Image (cartoon, rainbow, N blue to C red):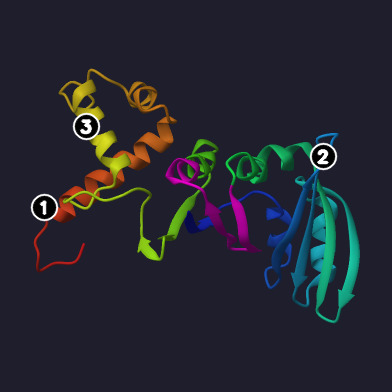
Amino acid sequence: MLLATLLIEYPILRETLSRAPDVTVTWEQSDLTEDGDHQLLVWVDGDEFAAFDAGLEVDPTVTAPVRVVEFGDRRLYQLELTPDGHRASVYPLVVEEGGVLQEVTATSEGWRFRVAFPDDEALERFYAFFTDHDLEVELRKLYEKGRSVDEPGARSEFGVTEYQREALVAAVDAGYLDIPRSCSLAELGDRLEISPNATSERFRRGVKTLIESTVYPADQSP
């Protein structure tokens, strides 16, 4: 089991949060109905509720906001995603991959996800969801069986993960590093059975780690 913390440029509620920059949204629960609708409960903390409510009215990712309960400077909202919001939502993928959302919060600066994944491949596909949609995503922390790592997979003697090693070897075998190249990034991704964006990310991380572990000066910090 892997526990990952990621910072994500997530489009859901982006318009609303841009109008209420001092508000914090905390995800409480999501429900997928038989009709395919996606409903969610979120806590909203702050003192800009008027701006937040106004943002909800024009936000293209949500509709039909319902204020469930209010406690001073904290409110619980029930929201329903629009078709645009549903297409942007990663929650169905989390369910499909057997992941568990531990904590999800959002501000005007972006979303912070803390998610438990059953294996490396589930995390890879979660990460690729955002890169495939041209959204910025940053893996901040990753814990595996009490051990902190910064990339999925076990590490080799050079520090690269198994997935990174696979990408590096495939790049050589396929001719991706030849001059001129005899293999495109998309073709390399087909070999690895992942998207071109995920292929690029994995290859670049592997090259960076390999350089830092081998030829980078030991007395300098990268």
Magenta span includes 119: yes
Residue 61 location (% of width, % of height): 75, 46
Magenta span includes 35: no
Highlighted magenta segment, given as a residue range: 99-124
In this rendering, the answer to whether 95 lies above or below 182 is: below
Residue hosting label 3: 169
In this rendering, the answer to whether 41 lies above or below 161 is: below
Circle 2 Cα neighbour tier, 10 Å, few/some/many (<14 / 14–19 / ≥20): few
Q: Name the kind of residue labelled 3 in the image.
A: Val
Disc 2/disc 1 C-alpha distance (Å): 51 Å
Q: Looking at the image, which residue is at 65% across and 48% down?
A: 11
Taking the image as shown, residue 159 lies to the left or right of residue 67, namely left
Q: Looking at the image, which residue is at 50% across and 49% down?
A: 136
Circle 1 Cα neighbour tier, 10 Å, few/some/many (<14 / 14–19 / ≥20): few
Residue hosting label 1: 214
Residue hosting label 2: 37
